[in-house]
Image (cartoon, helix red, strand yellow):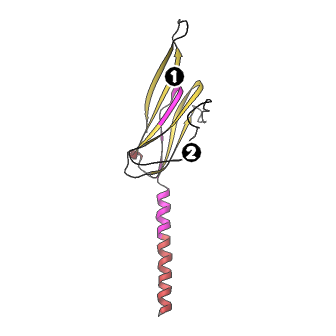
Amino acid sequence: MKNRRMLLAGVGLIVAGGAIASAQADNDKLGATLFTPRDRGDHFVCAAVNIGDKTLRSITFKILGNDGALLTPAAGSADTNPTSALNVTPGTAAEIDINLAPPDDGYCEVAVSGTGNRNDVRVGLVTSLTRATPGTIPPVPVFVTRAVEGH
């Protein structure tokens, strides 16, 4: 009788362990990738805000050129491109902030892990382009800034 109880207990533990691993594997598949429209600039800031009710386990940012290749940040940029994975708690934001030299076209790709619902995240790209006012001596800089939303 004692051997049967031990056998049943062992089988129960194996079944329970398999159910937990299966649930965890399904949870690991939860993710979404969002993109912004492209824009031209010499300064790119791509941000994501977690508006969901649970922590997003991993958000990574990439700023890509028209050809889909990573844009190379200029010396002195605040971040690297792409970023390392970041955990983002509900109600908080994370971002990538890079400078380019010379200006280029680019867009932002944000890969999110921890939710399968794209509506849990808002993504935006702010670009700045520095120009000089024509005919001014010395040149007078003008900053053109745009903001676009990603989906």
In x, y percent, where is residue 134?
A: 52, 8
Q: Is residue 46 above or below residue 128?
A: below
Q: Is residue 38 above or below residue 59?
A: above
Q: Quadrant of residue 74?
A: top right
Q: Which amino acid type is marked by label 2?
A: Ser
Task: Give the residue displayed 51% in from the left and 76% down from the top.
Answer: 14
List the residue tagged with mark 2.
84
**Residue 26 sits inside the magenta stretch:** yes
Task: Give the residue displayed 53% in from the left and 27% down from the top.
Answer: 43
Label 2 element class? loop
Label placed on residue 120: none
Q: Which amino acid type is marked by label 1?
A: Leu
Packing grade of label 2 (10 A; few <14, some 14-19, many >=20) is few
Q: Quadrant of residue 79?
A: top right
Q: Is residue 18 above or below residue 92?
A: below
Packing grade of label 1 (10 A; few <14, some 14-19, many >=20) is some
Task: Give the residue displayed 49% in from the left and 72% down from the top.
Answer: 17
List the residue tagged with mark 1.
129
**Residue 25 sits inside the magenta stretch:** yes
In x, y percent, where is residue 34?
A: 47, 41
In x, y percent, where is residue 94?
A: 47, 41
Label 1 element class? strand
| For marks 1 and 2 on the same chain, the one whose residue lies earlier in the sequence | 2
In x, y percent, where is residue 13?
A: 49, 77
Q: Quadrant of residue 106?
A: top right
What residue range appears in magenta?
A: 19-46
Return the residue nearer the eye: 79 or 57: 79
Q: CA distance from mark 1 to mark 2?
A: 26 Å
